[in-house]
Amino acid sequence: MFIFYKLILGHLIADFFLQFEELYRFKLRSSIGHLAHALVHFATCLLALFPYLDRPFIWIFVGLISAIHFLQDSLKYSLQEKYPRARFPIFVLDQIFHILFLASILLFPISQLKVGFSPELPALNILYLEEPWTKLALVFFVTTVGGSYLLHNFRKSYFPTTSRHDHGITTFEILHAAFERTWITTAFATLSFTPLLALSPAVGLLRLPSARLRNVLDFILSFLYAAVVGLLAREFI
């Protein structure tokens, strides 16, 4: 599962963390935006598998996965434009297929290979080779930027009249969500730390100074999502 986790991490970083506002709008305007995003995905997955780059198979596999990612993204945006009320299920299905295509690495012998950096980089090897660190990173990106795009599409599907075109995915809102949902996810992932869990709803008070964030429905959705990710993280990590 080691390489699979690294590929998922590369995918999450490229698909959400590096999907900044300008690139998102570029993708809405032109297929060149989708190509740019696919190239970012290609580079990020290669970086996630840096110690394996002396193996041609990795370059071929990541190249094919990124090409499929380009086709999937183009289809997803086309379908979401045609069926705006189905944005959420389309988004979820798109992510499921991304993960399934990445999981195809498990069909090849290289998926059993665990390679790190040179022995002269022990700290880097600890972060790279020990799975709990990768799993923590996966949970972080799922609950923060991944959650922002998931909730954005949920909002656009089921509450279109009260949702902005960029609802929840502006840089400011994503940065706020990174703090808010990390706090809530951590609270539910560490249920034994009762004070943190008891105070987790209070993190919503930090929304009050901003009119854009001062939305009860947004906080409820964000809180419930982060709580579920936190409970699942207890079993995953």
Image (cartoon, rainbow, N blue to C red):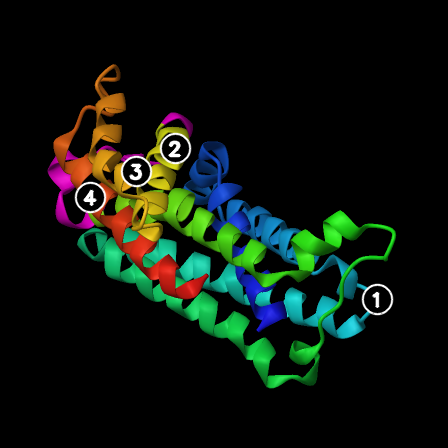
Residue matched to label 2 = 179
| 4 or 3: tag closer to the N-terminus | 3
Residue matched to label 1 = 54
In the displayed structure, does residue 24 sit left or right of residue 117? left
Q: Is mark 1 on a helix, strand or loop?
A: loop
Tell me if residue 178 comes above or below residue 1 in the rendering.
above
Tell me if residue 145 comes above or below residue 232 in the rendering.
above
Residue matched to label 4 = 221
Give, as a three-letter code, the residue at label 1. Answer: Asp
- Over which residues does the magenta segment extend? 155-172
Asked if the magenta segment contains residue 69, the reply would be: no
Q: How crowded is mark 4: few (under 14 residues within 10 Å), some or many (20 or more)?
A: some
**C-alpha distance separating marks 4 and 1:** 44 Å
Q: How many marks?
A: 4
Q: Percent position (x, y) of residue 125?
A: 74, 55
Please report contact status of discs 1 and 2: CB closer than 8 Å, yes or no: no
User: Can residue 126 be seen in this snapshot?
Assistant: yes
Tell me if residue 106 comes above or below residue 155 in the rendering.
below
**C-alpha distance separating marks 2 and 4:** 15 Å
Residue matched to label 3 = 196
Q: Is mark 3 on a helix, strand or loop?
A: helix
Q: Which of marks 4 and 3 is in front?
A: 3
